[in-house]
Amino acid sequence: MPLFVISNQSGVALGKFAPSALDPVEARLQALAARAGVRFTAIYWCPHHPQGVAPEYTRVCDCRKPAPGMVLRAAREHAIDLSRSWFIGDILDDVEAGHRAGCRCVLIDNGNETEWLRGDGREPDIVVTDMREAALAIVAAECPA
Protein backbone atom coordinates (compact mmCIF):
# COMPACT_ATOMS: atom_id res chain seq x y z
CA MET A 1 0.00 0.00 0.00
CA PRO A 2 1.60 3.29 -1.03
CA LEU A 3 1.99 5.93 1.66
CA PHE A 4 2.75 9.61 1.07
CA VAL A 5 3.51 12.72 3.07
CA ILE A 6 1.89 15.87 1.72
CA SER A 7 2.83 18.98 3.67
CA ASN A 8 2.71 22.76 3.42
CA GLN A 9 6.12 24.18 4.28
CA SER A 10 5.54 27.92 4.01
CA GLY A 11 8.70 28.57 6.03
CA VAL A 12 10.55 28.45 2.71
CA ALA A 13 8.48 31.29 1.21
CA LEU A 14 8.56 33.18 4.50
CA GLY A 15 12.37 33.08 4.51
CA LYS A 16 12.62 31.00 7.68
CA PHE A 17 14.63 28.21 6.05
CA ALA A 18 15.97 27.12 2.68
CA PRO A 19 14.29 24.38 0.64
CA SER A 20 17.34 22.20 1.33
CA ALA A 21 16.40 22.19 5.03
CA LEU A 22 13.59 19.82 4.09
CA ASP A 23 16.06 17.11 3.02
CA PRO A 24 16.97 16.04 6.58
CA VAL A 25 13.30 16.28 7.56
CA GLU A 26 12.47 13.85 4.77
CA ALA A 27 15.26 11.53 5.87
CA ARG A 28 14.02 11.61 9.46
CA LEU A 29 10.44 10.90 8.39
CA GLN A 30 11.63 7.91 6.36
CA ALA A 31 13.69 6.68 9.33
CA LEU A 32 10.69 6.92 11.67
CA ALA A 33 8.50 5.14 9.14
CA ALA A 34 11.11 2.39 8.78
CA ARG A 35 11.01 1.82 12.53
CA ALA A 36 7.30 1.11 12.11
CA GLY A 37 8.02 -1.27 9.22
CA VAL A 38 6.81 1.01 6.41
CA ARG A 39 8.26 3.34 3.82
CA PHE A 40 6.83 6.50 2.34
CA THR A 41 6.47 6.10 -1.41
CA ALA A 42 7.09 9.83 -1.84
CA ILE A 43 7.09 13.05 0.13
CA TYR A 44 5.63 16.22 -1.35
CA TRP A 45 6.28 19.70 0.01
CA CYS A 46 4.58 22.97 -0.90
CA PRO A 47 7.11 25.76 -0.23
CA HIS A 48 4.78 28.56 -1.36
CA HIS A 49 2.91 31.25 0.53
CA PRO A 50 1.10 34.26 -0.93
CA GLN A 51 2.64 36.60 1.69
CA GLY A 52 6.17 35.21 1.47
CA VAL A 53 9.40 37.15 1.31
CA ALA A 54 11.34 34.79 -0.99
CA PRO A 55 10.20 35.94 -4.47
CA GLU A 56 10.54 32.53 -6.15
CA TYR A 57 8.14 30.99 -3.58
CA THR A 58 5.78 33.92 -2.99
CA ARG A 59 2.59 33.15 -4.86
CA VAL A 60 -0.81 31.54 -4.81
CA CYS A 61 -0.41 27.99 -6.08
CA ASP A 62 -2.44 24.85 -6.60
CA CYS A 63 -0.30 22.79 -4.25
CA ARG A 64 -0.77 24.65 -0.96
CA LYS A 65 -3.44 22.89 1.05
CA PRO A 66 -6.39 23.23 1.11
CA ALA A 67 -5.82 23.15 -2.67
CA PRO A 68 -5.53 19.54 -3.85
CA GLY A 69 -2.51 19.99 -6.14
CA MET A 70 -0.02 17.82 -4.23
CA VAL A 71 -2.57 15.02 -3.83
CA LEU A 72 -3.43 15.13 -7.52
CA ARG A 73 0.27 15.15 -8.43
CA ALA A 74 0.91 12.08 -6.27
CA ALA A 75 -2.03 10.34 -7.92
CA ARG A 76 -0.72 11.13 -11.42
CA GLU A 77 2.85 10.14 -10.66
CA HIS A 78 1.95 6.89 -8.89
CA ALA A 79 -1.28 5.80 -10.62
CA ILE A 80 -3.33 6.17 -7.44
CA ASP A 81 -7.11 5.74 -7.46
CA LEU A 82 -8.07 8.61 -5.17
CA SER A 83 -11.63 7.32 -4.78
CA ARG A 84 -10.12 4.34 -2.96
CA SER A 85 -7.64 6.44 -0.98
CA TRP A 86 -7.58 7.96 2.48
CA PHE A 87 -6.10 11.31 3.41
CA ILE A 88 -5.13 11.79 7.05
CA GLY A 89 -4.50 15.23 8.49
CA ASP A 90 -4.62 17.22 11.67
CA ILE A 91 -6.41 20.36 10.45
CA LEU A 92 -9.50 21.00 8.37
CA ASP A 93 -7.40 22.38 5.48
CA ASP A 94 -6.05 18.83 5.18
CA VAL A 95 -9.57 17.41 5.12
CA GLU A 96 -10.58 19.91 2.45
CA ALA A 97 -7.55 19.10 0.29
CA GLY A 98 -8.27 15.39 0.55
CA HIS A 99 -11.95 15.78 -0.28
CA ARG A 100 -11.22 18.14 -3.18
CA ALA A 101 -8.93 15.45 -4.59
CA GLY A 102 -11.59 12.76 -4.18
CA CYS A 103 -10.27 10.97 -1.09
CA ARG A 104 -12.01 9.95 2.09
CA CYS A 105 -10.55 11.82 5.04
CA VAL A 106 -9.55 11.24 8.63
CA LEU A 107 -9.03 14.16 10.97
CA ILE A 108 -6.63 13.60 13.84
CA ASP A 109 -8.07 15.93 16.47
CA ASN A 110 -4.90 16.50 18.47
CA GLY A 111 -5.23 20.22 19.13
CA ASN A 112 -3.53 21.49 15.96
CA GLU A 113 -6.76 22.84 14.44
CA THR A 114 -7.24 26.33 15.80
CA GLU A 115 -9.87 27.86 13.48
CA TRP A 116 -12.52 25.12 13.11
CA LEU A 117 -13.91 26.72 9.96
CA ARG A 118 -16.37 24.04 8.93
CA GLY A 119 -18.01 24.05 5.53
CA ASP A 120 -18.24 22.33 2.19
CA GLY A 121 -15.55 19.66 1.91
CA ARG A 122 -14.26 20.32 5.43
CA GLU A 123 -16.20 17.62 7.29
CA PRO A 124 -14.02 14.58 7.97
CA ASP A 125 -15.31 11.08 7.34
CA ILE A 126 -13.69 9.92 10.58
CA VAL A 127 -12.31 11.78 13.61
CA VAL A 128 -9.66 10.19 15.84
CA THR A 129 -7.06 11.33 18.35
CA ASP A 130 -3.86 9.83 16.93
CA MET A 131 -2.28 8.04 13.97
CA ARG A 132 -2.79 4.59 15.50
CA GLU A 133 -6.52 5.23 15.81
CA ALA A 134 -6.54 6.55 12.24
CA ALA A 135 -4.99 3.34 10.93
CA LEU A 136 -7.41 1.16 12.91
CA ALA A 137 -10.40 3.23 11.76
CA ILE A 138 -9.36 2.96 8.11
CA VAL A 139 -8.90 -0.80 8.38
CA ALA A 140 -12.33 -1.09 10.02
CA ALA A 141 -13.91 1.02 7.28
CA GLU A 142 -12.23 -1.01 4.52
CA CYS A 143 -12.77 -4.43 6.09
CA PRO A 144 -16.04 -4.36 8.05
CA ALA A 145 -16.68 -7.43 10.20
Image: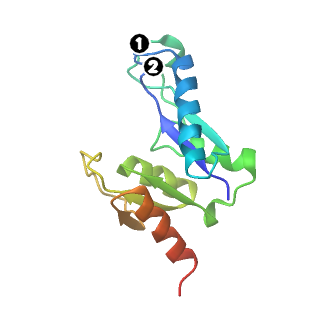
Query: In screen coordinates, is 78 left or right of 49?
Result: right
Mark 1 residue crowding within 10 angstroms, few (<14) / some (14–19) / many (20+): some
The answer to which of 13 and 67 lies nearer the viewer is 13
The residue under the point 43% across, 49% down is 94
Residue that label 2 marks? 13
Inspect this view and state whether residue 55 appears: yes
Task: Residue at the far bottom: name it.
Answer: 145
Q: Are marks 1 and 2 in contact (CB under 8 Å)?
A: yes
Q: Residue 33 location in percent, x, y?
A: 56, 46
- Label 1 sits on what residue type? Val
Determine which residue is flagged by label 1. Answer: 53
Q: Residue at x 68, y 50 (%)?
A: 75
How is the protein colored in the picture? rainbow
Which residue is located at x 39 percent, y 58 percent? 107
Q: Amino acid at mark 2?
A: Ala
Q: Quadrant of the N terminus?
A: bottom right
Front in this rendered view, residue 120 or 82: 82
Does 126 appear above or below 75? below
Q: Number of callouts in the render? A: 2
The residue tagged with tag 2: helix, strand or loop? loop
